[in-house]
Image (tube, rainbow, N blue to C red):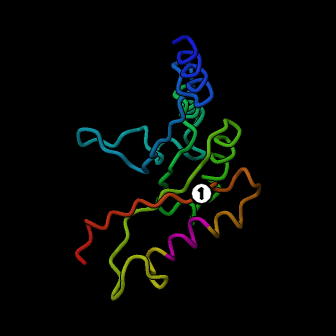
Amino acid sequence: MRRVSLLIGSLLLDSGLTASATPHRDVWFWNTTELYGIDSTHSSEFVVGPATGAAEDEAIAFMTAQSIKEVYGSYKQRPRDVPTDIWPWNEKLEAAGIDSQLLISGFEAPSPGPLTDPDHLSLVTKVQERLIDFNDDAPSVAAQFDALHLDLEPQSLDD
């Protein structure tokens, strides 16, 4: 019986399933979020950017304390229109050991063709402008998005 207990304990330690293991959490960080009909000041619109003051640092400190390892960030058109607002944020996340993944959602149904069609202009344009062009123009690797996170909800499309 003691051998079985030692074996199970060893497996738990190796697999990281012990109570002392640090969790790996991710968070969706929406551009805007409403709470009771009021815009939340904890959304990326209010937290990320040069005019936000200490809000970026406070958000990253909170994320670090909560063991957040990946942020799926929605920034609307800002990666295309004002990438200089997002690059420093990505660099801060990188310095904190947090991956920054661009979150894209809100696709319009193409006419005609499925959402996965390479000619789907809404999807292709968003990925090109908000991820590829953004990363190509970034001043450093740390300023780039680490990945793309798609929020596709086909049940919301008519077709």
> How many dots with numbers?
1
Q: Choose between 157 and 23: the one closer to the eye.
A: 23
Which quarter shows the C terminus?
A: bottom left
Name of the residue lying farthest toward the right: 140
Label 1 CA crowd tier, 10 Å (few <14, some 14–19, many 20+): some
Residue annotated with mark 1: 147
The residue shown at (67%, 35%) is 96
Q: Could you tell me which secondary element the residue under label 1 belongs to?
A: strand
Name of the residue lying farthest toward the bottom: 112
| Residue 14 picture quarter | top right
Q: Is residue 61 left or right of residue 154?
A: right
The residue shown at (75%, 55%) is 141
The residue shown at (71%, 65%) is 137
Q: Is residue 123 left or right of residue 107?
A: right
Q: Mostly what secondary structure, the magenta segment?
A: helix
**Residue 19 x/y as whole percent:** 51, 19
The residue shown at (53%, 27%) is 17
| Residue 43 picture quarter | top left
Query: Identity of the amino acid at label 1?
Result: Ala
Instruction: Check the image and report above or below for 20 versus 151.
Output: above
Instruction: Check the image and report above or below for 154 versus 94.
Output: below
Instruction: Check the image and report above or below for 113 versus 14.
Output: below
**Residue 20 x/y as whole percent:** 56, 18
Q: Is residue 106 left or right of residue 102?
A: left
Q: Choose between 24 and 39: the one closer to the eye.
A: 24
Which range of residues does the magenta coloring cover? 124-131
**Residue 82 x/y as whole percent:** 59, 60
Q: Is residue 15 left or right of residue 150?
A: right
Q: Tell me, yes or no, whether the highlighted magenta stretch contains residue 94.
A: no
Q: Choose between 91 and 25: the one closer to the eye.
A: 25
